[in-house]
Amino acid sequence: MSRLEKFLGKPKEIDLDGEKILIKPLTLKDMPLILKLGKDETTAEAVTELVQRTLKDCFPDATQQELDSVSIEYFQKIIDAIMDVNNLKSGLSAEDVIKRFAKK
């Protein structure tokens, strides 16, 4: 690896209902999705996609149907872990995202 290696994010392991999963940091390739988080009209979809991308990275064999069916009860813990591993302040709650979906 090059000297750039020190700028690569470090993953974080979380326990999700007894299942250990490794949350990997976002990268520059995720920037278009990250920018959608700041816009009211796209935040809900962007957060959903962010959670699904993260879970797909943790469980590569997961089907889209399985990703779509993950219980909302795990949403806040996953979002908090994504924000934490990326050194971001969350401010995103499951309730806020649900309200944004409801506005549509």
Image (cartoon, rainbow, N blue to C red):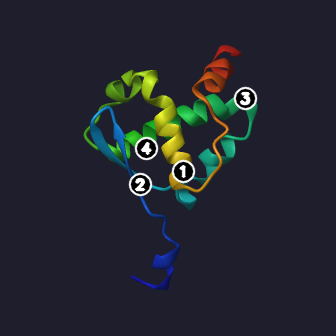
- Mark 4 or mark 2: whose residue is earlier in sequence: 2
Please give the label number shown on residue 84: 1
> Which residue lies under the disc numbered 4?
54
The reply to whether the C-beta atoms of the residues labelled 4 and 2 are less than 8 Å apart is no
> Which residue lies under the disc numbered 3?
41
Q: Relative to 93, is 38 on the left or the right?
A: right
Amino acid type indicated by mark 2: Lys
Relative to 102, residue 18 above or below: below
Q: CA distance from mark 3 to mark 2?
A: 30 Å
Q: Position of residue 46 (x, y in %)?
A: 59, 36
> Which residue lies under the disc numbered 2?
12
Q: Relative to 90, is 18 on the left or the right?
A: left
Q: Residue at 54% across / 50% down in the picture? A: 84
- Mark 1 or mark 3: whose residue is earlier in sequence: 3
Which residue is outermost to the bottom? 3
Graded by Cα atoms within 10 Å as few (under 14), some (14 to 19) or many (20 or more), the crowding at tag 1 reads some
Secondary structure type for disc 4: helix
Graded by Cα atoms within 10 Å as few (under 14), some (14 to 19) or many (20 or more), the crowding at tag 3 reads some
- Mark 3 or mark 4: whose residue is earlier in sequence: 3
Q: Relative to 22, is 92 on the left or the right?
A: right
The reply to whether the C-beta atoms of the residues labelled 2 and 1 are less than 8 Å apart is yes
Amino acid type indicated by mark 3: Glu
Which of pointers 3 and 4 indicates the residue nearer the eye? 4
Which of pointers 3 and 2 indicates the residue nearer the eye? 2
